[in-house]
Amino acid sequence: MNEPHASRTEEPGLPSDAASRNDPGGTAAILIGFLFSFLGGLGLTIVYALGGQPQAEGVLLAVGLFGLGFGLVTWAHRLMPHGPFEEPRELPTSEAEREAFERDLEQGGVIGRRKILIGGLVAAAGSLAIAALFPIRSLGPSPGKSLVRTPWRRGKRLVTDANVPIRAADVPVEGLVTAFPEGSPGSADGQIVLIRVEPGLLQPTGERATWSPEGFIAYSKVCTHAGCPVGLYQAETHQLLCPCHQSAFDVLNEAKVVFGPAFRALPQLPLVIDAEGFLAAQSDFHEPIGPSFWNRG
Ligand code: FES
């Protein structure tokens, strides 16, 4: 009474549905594949957690994926029925047949093996999925606003790399000084070039009208092309030059690019001369410093 009454495969030349589902060798091969996949994923997780080792990670990832692939392909070939099918149904008609059919279902031989296989698949795929989460940790902390903010704040004085405040009267006309925010000497993103020109040469407009008192003007020293320090000043042409790829910026015209591969002007730092005669910032830069990235023109 254990004959399968629910369905029957009639395809000639192919394993019958019942025969293909009763394949202990296939089941064992699938479980071995999933076991390898699980161990590969587990090993990958452990190697990541211990600090990582590229060669070991590559081998373990290959083992994990190969085991998973092997298990799935074997499952498809060995245990899944092959079509096309004709399935004339012979449902139990007598009471005795119906009871036998229900006993077969409740016995759950096929369902029990399926549960084992699905459990193996979940374990294998799960261990690989957990291992895949670890690279996210390698991305490091979020940069937050660090890409758009610098140490400059309202009232911070300009200082030398020795943290000495710069007095306006000490900077000669056409002189160039590399300066930093007070308290952050040597700051990579806060470094600026301070230039003093004859006040009449500057014709700032709009919000920049008050940013360059007495001919003092300051720009970010970080080149907008690839981030090199813009440290050369040609007083005759009033141009700042980047030594890396020869970009040139017009000091008298908002540091707009006049030559070279840089795409945009150097950001300007709004300046003020405080009550004691020292140069200070009115605020941070009004735009991000440094090379263009994806969300800038
Ligand atoms: S980094 Fe300045 S021109 Fe390339």
Image: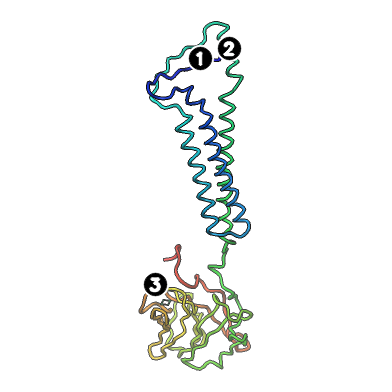
* Tag 1 residue: 5
- At a point 42% along the width and 15% down the height, the residue shown is 88
Find residue 186 and report its horizontal and vertical position in percent: 58, 81
Query: Where residue 100 is drawn, which disc sits there?
Result: 2
How far separated are the C-alphas under marks 3 and 2?
81 Å
Which one is in front, 10 or 29? 29
How far separated are the C-alphas under marks 1 and 2?
9 Å
Find residue 279 and report its horizontal and vertical position in percent: 57, 85
How far separated are the C-alphas under marks 3 and 1?
76 Å
In this view, 88 is above or below 152: above
- At a point 39% along the width and 21% down the height, the residue shown is 11
User: Whereabouts is ligand 1, in terms of quadrant?
Assistant: bottom left
Find residue 276 and report its horizontal and vertical position in percent: 63, 88
Which one is in front, 123 or 218? 123
Q: Looking at the image, tell me whether mark 1 or mark 2 is earlier in sequence order.
A: 1
Q: Residues within 10 Å of mark 3 (few under 14, many from 20)?
A: some
- At a point 49% along the width and 79% down the height, the residue shown is 221
Q: Looking at the image, tell me whether mark 3 or mark 2 is earlier in sequence order.
A: 2
Q: Depth-wise, is mark 3 or mark 2 nearer the camera?
A: 2
Q: Residues within 10 Å of mark 2 (few under 14, many from 20)?
A: some
Could you say which quadrant of the image residue 168 lies in?
A: bottom right
Question: Disc 1 on helix, strand or loop?
Answer: loop
Query: Where residue 263 is drawn, which disc sits there?
Result: 3
Q: Are marks 1 and 2 in contact (CB under 8 Å)?
A: yes
Q: Residues within 10 Å of mark 1 (few under 14, many from 20)?
A: some
Question: Disc 2 on helix, strand or loop?
Answer: helix
Could you say which quadrant of the image residue 84 lies in?
A: top left
Find residue 165 and report its horizontal and vertical position in percent: 61, 87
In this view, 123 is above or below 214: above
Q: Amino acid at mark 3?
A: Phe
